[in-house]
Amino acid sequence: MAKKETVLAYVQAYEYIRDRILNGELERGTKLVEERLAEEIGISRTPVRESIRKLEQEGLIKQKRVVNPSDMDLRHIFQVRILLEGFAARHCASYMTEEALVKLEECVVTGRTGNMEEVMTANKEFHEIIVGSTNNPVMIDIIDRMQSIIYLFRKTVVYHKRPFLIEEHNDIYDAILNHNGDEAERLMKEHLQLDLEFCLNRMKG
């Protein structure tokens, strides 16, 4: 039971700190004080320390201070995503299971019909299903370690309603469904490039 409580405290701390950073409540450059955060959340310092370590791996915190990704940081992150997710989409055109295809289509449908939170979740799942279908633990781990930063950008494109976002998901799904690896890879790379450009423009704005 104690182990379960420790895991729950870690998840609670991780989500609390991450969400406050992503919502802008903890501004860039803010120094994170473990004791204060533990007191705010109502838990011990250990899960707070572990959460900060995880967020450092994900790029949201550096030397216990909140970071703010620069244009160049953004470009570097998207370069990695474009390479890996482009490959993943190509792979899926040949190897994706029927079950995963059904889930992918559901993400597209939810993207068209859901509320803001449902669209956010569907967007996340769409990309996770494609990366997960590679069954490549190294690739999955690299993307997983970028999740917080990816979430920040996903929020930007969904909340500010980037044009053609869901139509692009649908086109990628169709290419995978039709076993067209070249097209699936090309469409995924274009999709992420457009996400990058949209985020860069919003940052300037």
Image: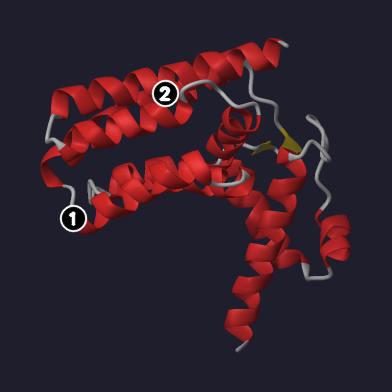
Residue 28, relative to residue 113: is it above or below? above
Question: Could you tell me which residue is drawn at 51 percent across and 44 percent down?
Answer: 113
Percent coordinates x, y for residue 128 in the rendering: 38, 46
Say which element carries label 2: helix
Residue 179, by quadrant, is: top left
Colour convention of the picture: secondary structure
Q: Residue at x 28, y 28 (%)?
A: 86
Give me the C-alpha separation between circle 1 and circle 2.
Answer: 25 Å
For residue 156, above or below residue 57? above
Q: Position of residue 19 (x, y in %)?
A: 71, 47
Can you identify the residue that label 1 sits on?
98
| Residue 23: percent from left, percent from top | 76, 40
Give amino acid for label 1. Glu
Position of residue 14 in the picture relative to residue 84 (left or right): right
Q: In which quadrant is the C terminus drawn?
A: top right
Q: What residue did someone put label 2 on?
A: 192
Marks 1 & 2, CB-CB < 8 Å contact: no
Q: Which mark is residue 156?
A: none
> How packed is label 1: few (under 14 Cα within 10 Å), some, or many (20 or more)?
few
Q: Is residue 79 visible?
A: no
Foreground pick, 124 / 106: 106
Residue at (32%, 26%) from the top-left corner? 188
Q: Amino acid at mark 2?
A: Leu
Q: Residue at x 58, y 51 (%)?
A: 54
Q: Secondary structure at mark 1?
A: helix
